[in-house]
Amino acid sequence: MRTDDGEDAGGALERLRATLEGTYVPPRKDAFDIGTDTLYGAIGGLELHCPHFDLLPGLRLRSTFCRVIAPYLMAFAPPPRPGLPHPNPWVALGEGGLTVLTELELTADAEAIGFDRLNTVWFVVALLRLRLGQPLQVPVIADRPFSVVKSAPESANIIPVELGAPLVRTTPHRGATQSDLQWIQSHLRAAAALMQDPIFNRALQTFDRAVAVPYPGAGIVIAWASIESLLRPGQQRITERLCRALATLLHPPGSTRDRAFTEIAACYEARGGAAHAGHMPDTKQFTKAFDLARAALMATIEQGRLPCRDELLRRWSQKL
């Protein structure tokens, strides 16, 4: 008799017995160099509506399935000796975990975009978080597709990456459309080139980390810090200059831009209340700050260059 993963039942029994006795020695992992070999990043929270989608040569999103199970376990007695498990009973605390429906394949010969291989995975997922506004995570990376790990799980290299607290949701749940994936595909190289500029790099990384802050008062400040990094309003008349520049970046001249300025100013005022008076922003202003930061960063990527604050203010004053 064989188990579901193809292991001989007798071998499985011997492995279980050795584990209980504390003498089990797992087989050696297959050779794997994260810096050069093909790797697979599990993306939690992203579901494709197609079997795969090529972003660049050697960089592909693919549908898959795995479940990262993450409850804390509680035992009530010490192990009888070192190397042995804690005796029963064990209690699972909660039902934590993350379902993965998409993997990012980065082949050994993938087109380079200016990052090391682990940060290439981070950057692609950061752009997906930016475009979708969804709290996507990469809990683990592996040296083979997740669909084949189960055939030899003990020889697979599976490395934890993002297994901390869940990210904050700032927009309603939605899936990735073909248009979203095409936007990433079309702008990936330009966005990677912009990351060589320390101003854009700081603005994007600041925004990407803001969703890891569970406290709304801090989150709205960090989201606005991303916008401030991008537009650099200076030290004088900060609110006026920043809100005018942002409204001009995001909207054509006319009544739409004027209304946007009023809404942006109200959101920045909520940011000031959180930063200087400890006020909790309401949900509308909290999500508005993230929407504005996302829009400003995506507009910058689409234009392929940093926004010029003085040019934006000139366009505002001349209604251009």
Image: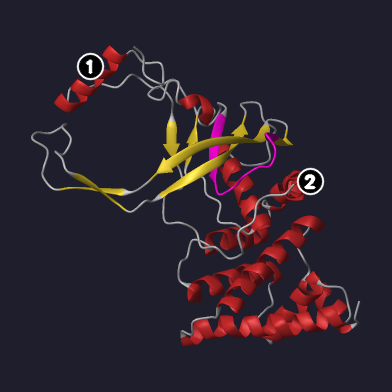
**Other-residue count near label 1 (Cα within 10 Å), few / some / many at <14 / 14–19 / ≥20:** few
Amino acid carrying mark 1 in the image: Glu
- Of 71 and 40, the residue lying toward us: 71
**From the viewer's perspective, is 205 left or right of 280?**
right
- Secondary structure beneath disc 2? helix
Residue drawn at 8 percent across, 35 percent down: 80
**From the viewer's perspective, is 248 left or right of 229?**
right
Amino acid carrying mark 2 in the image: Ser
**From the viewer's perspective, is 54 left or right of 18?**
right
Residue drawn at 77 percent across, 66 percent down: 307
Task: Indicate whether 247 appears above or below 5.
Answer: below
Q: Is residue 178 magenta?
A: no
Across and down, in percent, residue 62 comes to 63, 35
Q: Which residues are magenta?
A: 39-52
Q: Quadrant of residue 247?
A: bottom right
Task: Indicate whether 19 appears above or below 70.
Answer: above
Tag in front: 1 or 2: 1
Give me the C-alpha separation between circle 1 and circle 2.
53 Å
Across and down, in percent, residue 63 comes to 61, 36
Across and down, in percent, residue 83 comes to 16, 31
Residue labelled with disc 2: 186
- Of 201 and 31, the residue lying toward us: 31
